[in-house]
Image (cartoon, helix red, strand yellow):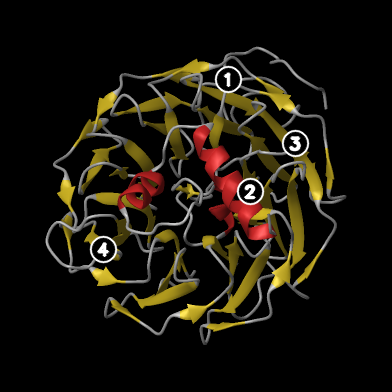
Amino acid sequence: MDENEIRVLFEHLARAERPPTAVDIALARSVGARRRRVKRAMIPAMSAGALATAATLIVTVPLPFGLFGPGGPAAGLCADGSHGRGPAAGPSAASAASVAYVANSFSGTVTPIKTADSRAGKAIRVGGAPAEIAVTPDGKTAYVASNGIGAVPGTVTPISTATNKAGKAIKVAAGHSFVFIAVTPDGKTVYAGDYRTGTVTPISTVTNTAGKAITVGKGPHAIAVTPDGKTAYVANNGSDTVTPISTATNAACNAITVGQNPAAIAVTPDGKTAYVANYGSDTVTPISTATNTAGNAITVGKNPAAIAITPDGKTAYVLLDSTDSVTPINTATNKAGKTIRVDSTQQGAMAVTPNGKTIYVLSFGLSTFSSSTFIVTPISTVTKTAGKAIKVGEDPTSIAITPNGRTVYVTNYASNTVTPINTVTNTAGKAIKVGEAPNAIVITP
């Protein structure tokens, strides 16, 4: 069995250990589809590592006064006043032009792309099956999470963005693991979750060493950090809970019960509310970050899989996995608005432009209105209507937007390419060749 066959086998096993994603469903319907796993959309926000990019769904701003007065809970305390459980424990120096980093899951590499001219650089080998990427807020380091393959452990590999050289891989999980990551707003800590063991491992970005793993719930699936950096919220897909982690002590606080199979989480720009997409119960649960208590569930439609919050914090957009729609939520009232139909029956990921005017929704599967199967649909946040679908490559899996808002980049898993989209004209440019099976992308500040 060669390396690719081993990876294919692992992708199959990894999917079997967790609920099927939108990509799993779409690929099952495709003729001649290969086995693969892609990161949950969030974009996740949706990855939390996108805190450092304009494609982030968690906007970094100071946290307003809450129940604990200025600065929130006292250092080392959970929002409920407890000490939790577990181990005790400046301005950006961004380069002139942003760089997009693309994780190629079958190649075991990361491809840098200069956004100034959309040209790919030399691939950076990181090993394993890279699945997620997060960039520090100063843009100096990209951290790559690789799933474990067989006896090969799950790791996080730092890449210097100045030299595009990979550092020593940091072990965070055993074999057959699904790893996801987030970076704190101060850039001092990377949190790496392990779906299989139900733990989150803190990594010091100063020393690039792992601390003691923090036990959370069963099947942790996504993580989001509050804008003030004091709390990391972990969605536990198998426990139907969210676990807050105090970043001051790296202690897990009391779990918060939400809906079935929480799949994505995002925090409002003011830091007051975390919204959790409950894939199995067709709802979104708002959580008060001041008290770590869940509010009334909001019914949004079938299989919510990702959440994007506008920079002004007024609206949370919820991507529905199994229907051709996106549901907006008014964050002031926590009421769901009229669903917005897009040109596909399967959604995968979405991202909001820095000015908050447009949401780009990545879609795949059977098309409702056109012959195109793999598309990106722009949605106006002003009119809450969908624009004309934009064709991209085969099996698009992740999406990111440049800090200046001019270009959207989409990874195409089966085409081994990245498609740039001009946000002024909403037209796709020439596909950029990268490694095999690109499934994650992040852009430096």
Q: Earlier in the sequence, mark 2 or mark 1?
A: 1
Q: CA distance from mark 3 to mark 2?
A: 28 Å
Q: Secondary structure at mark 4?
A: loop
Marks 2 and 4 sit apart, C-alpha to C-alpha, by 37 Å
User: Any mark on residue 174, and which?
Assistant: 3
Task: Tell me how far mark 3 sits from mark 1, CA to CA.
Answer: 32 Å
* Element on which disc 2 rests: loop
In the picture of the structure, the residue carrying the numbered disc 2 is 185
Q: Is residue 94 above or below residue 353?
A: below
Up the image or down, 65 lies above or below 80; here it is: below
> In this rendering, is residue 66 above or below 366?
above
* Percent position of residue 211, x then y: 82, 35
Res 214 seen here: yes
Distance of label 4 from label 3 (alpha carbons): 36 Å
For marks 4 and 1, the one nearer the N-term is 1
The mark that comes first in sequence, 3 or 1, is: 1
